[in-house]
């Protein structure tokens, strides 16, 4: 049998068989590597600007599986030590609340130039001016809607983001995007990233708590506070003033002595089991959760005793309101303040639940009758939320707490043609604000266009927004990572820049 014809190399391929060329190229490459190393040591690489290091190697916190909640140092010094996120589910209309657009009055009842014929839920209607009057508030004179008089009165303390934009206009994916940085399920929430990186100061309470709206969970439910692929220890614990943590009370039939002996025996068995499987983070998380539950038997009853607050506090928050939903939400706001006071690292407070109860009824998703439905949601949210912020300011909690008020996207400047009384989803522009440690007061970053339809100046992505939150907590969003499925995963994926203009 004849040997097959030898493989014929192209002229380009033959050059790689040249020994002299190989040695020459190798010397050049090694010399380049050496030069880069010298430049980096001297801080002269082009990527190193404004005192920032080009070293973006991953930072993974060193975590003791037996004590995953131990406090850990941030990557760099920062004012904010704790995080409170107030999430208004359903998409608050920015042009009816915080983003004043005079052009909407001029074009009221008309079609806007370049207006899309069809949006998320169907054909678009005509431009509609804000459903509520705007008036200047505070020393800054910021124009705020009369829909939110209580929040508007504190405008001088806010740092607005007016040109936020999302990558999706569907509620479930948009909630995921705001909370986890990804539209898909299975990724860690921002609170999980923060507790993973920093642990918590109070070892008697969870590091991360999600407080659900009195009407139920938000559309994406536990994805908003899930741990994703992070160790299970860092998932959020969800409970509220009306629904405290279940199954932590000791039955009356079990005496304290017997209960202590049982706990001691379980601790010995757990410790022995963990010694046999030291790398099992799921087991360690389970043991840590049991131990935390034991400590919570003492701490939670006192924490959730909202009725023990002075009458003036209950009245200030609206907890004495005849509106049962407002009263229940107000008590959740008091609970959130108590947790921040006790040193809980991250608290996520939800206003609005899944839309299964009807359009604009259980949350801010006002596709029709926006004047009625947004009005109803504002009556629930405005006073208690403003009281929470004012109370935290009065108690000095804002000195080391970053507050974030946000929603998943905005609403269109025109009405829906199908009903003529509501606004459709708008992922192109929406407003959120920060307050407290590390951010400027009475400041607005970015602008939407003249109709509030899309970002026009200093546009901010959700990645940028989350990167800024981490930065304010002393965390480098490009280096805080977790190795999963062959990839270094992070909250901001491969995107995002810190919005330095908002920093103090």
Image: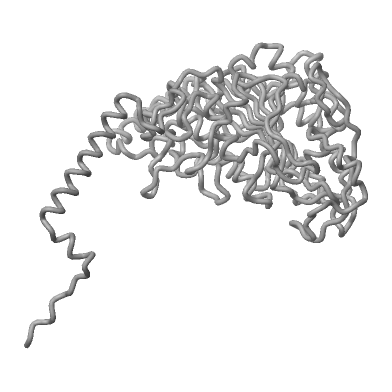
Q: Position of residue 121 (x, y in %)?
A: 77, 58
Q: Is residue 145 left or right of residue 255?
A: right
Q: Residue at x 78, y 60 (%)?
A: 118
**Quadrant housing the N terminus:** bottom left
Comparing 146 with 382, the one in front is 146
Q: Position of residue 351 (x, y in %)?
A: 73, 36
Q: Position of residue 365 (x, y in %)?
A: 78, 47
Comparing 50 with 301, the one in front is 50
Q: Is residue 458 left or right of residue 8?
A: right
| Name of the residue lying farthest toward the right | 109
Question: Which quadrant of the structure image shows residue 385?
Answer: top right
Q: Residue at x 78, y 20 (%)?
A: 154
Q: Taking the image as drawn, is residue 202 in sight?
A: yes
Q: Residue at x 13, y 49 (%)?
A: 23
Q: Position of residue 468 (x, y in %)?
A: 56, 30
Question: Which quadrant of the structure image shows residue 272?
Answer: top left
| Name of the residue lying farthest toward the top | 395
Look at the picture and state if 401 lies above or below 275. above
Look at the picture and state if 114 lies above or below 320. below
Look at the picture and state if 486 lies above or below 136. below
Comparing 6 with 334, the one in front is 6
Comparing 278 with 299, the one in front is 278
| Name of the residue lying farthest toward the bottom | 1
The colour mode here is one colour
């Amino acid at each position: 049998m004849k040997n097959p014809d030898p493989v014929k190399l192209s002229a380009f391929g033959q050059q790689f068989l040249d020994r002299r060329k190989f040695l020459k190229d190798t010397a050049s490459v090694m010399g380049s590597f050496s030069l880069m190393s010298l430049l980096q040591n001297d801080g002269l690489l082009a990527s190193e600007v404004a005192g920032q290091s080009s070293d973006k190697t991953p930072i993974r916190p060193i975590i003791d599986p037996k004590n995953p909640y131990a406090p850990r140092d941030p990557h760099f010094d920062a004012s904010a030590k704790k995080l409170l996120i107030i999430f208004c589910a359903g998409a608050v209309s920015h042009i009816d609340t915080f983003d004043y657009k005079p052009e909407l009055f001029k074009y009221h009842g008309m079609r806007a130039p370049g207006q899309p014929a069809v949006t998320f839920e169907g054909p678009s209607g005509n431009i509609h001016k804000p459903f509520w009057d705007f008036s200047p508030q505070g020393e800054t004179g910021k124009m705020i809607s009369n829909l939110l008089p209580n929040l508007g009165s504190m405008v001088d303390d806010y740092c607005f983001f007016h040109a936020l934009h999302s990558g999706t206009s569907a509620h479930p994916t948009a909630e995921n995007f705001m909370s986890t940085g990804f539209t898909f399920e299975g990724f860690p929430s921002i609170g999980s990233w923060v507790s993973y990186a920093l642990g918590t100061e109070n070892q008697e309470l969870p590091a991360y708590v999600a407080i659900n709206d009195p009407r139920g969970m938000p559309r994406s439910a536990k994805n908003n506070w899930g741990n994703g692929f992070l160790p299970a220890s860092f998932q959020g614990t969800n409970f509220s003033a009306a629904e405290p943590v279940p199954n932590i009370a000791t039955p009356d039939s079990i005496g304290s002595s017997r209960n202590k002996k049982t706990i001691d025996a379980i601790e010995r068995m757990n410790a022995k089991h963990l010694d046999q499987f030291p790398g099992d983070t799921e087991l360690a998380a389970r043991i840590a959760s049991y131990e935390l539950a034991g400590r919570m038997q003492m701490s939670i009853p006192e924490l959730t005793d909202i009725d023990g607050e002075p009458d003036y506090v209950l009245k200030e928050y609206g907890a004495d309101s005849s509106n049962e939903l407002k009263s229940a939400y107000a008590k959740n706001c008091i609970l959130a303040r108590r947790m921040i006071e006790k040193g809980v690292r991250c608290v996520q407070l939800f206003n609005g639940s899944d839309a299964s109860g009807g359009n604009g009824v259980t949350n801010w998703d006002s596709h029709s009758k926006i004047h009625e439905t947004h009005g109803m949601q504002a009556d629930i949210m405005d006073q208690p939320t403003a009281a929470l912020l004012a109370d935290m300011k009065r108690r000095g909690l804002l000195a080391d707490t970053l507050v974030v008020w946000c929603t998943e996207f905005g609403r269109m400047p025109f009405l829906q043609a199908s009903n003529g009384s509501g606004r459709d989803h708008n992922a192109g522009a929406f407003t959120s604000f920060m307050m407290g440690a590390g951010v400027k007061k009475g400041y607005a970053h970015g602008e939407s266009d003249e109709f509030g339809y899309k970002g026009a100046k200093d546009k901010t992505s959700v990645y940028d927004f989350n990167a800024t939150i981490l930065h304010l907590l002393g965390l480098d969003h490009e280096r805080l990572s977790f190795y999963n499925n062959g990839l270094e995963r992070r909250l901001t994926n491969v995107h995002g820049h810190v919005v330095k203009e908002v920093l103090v």
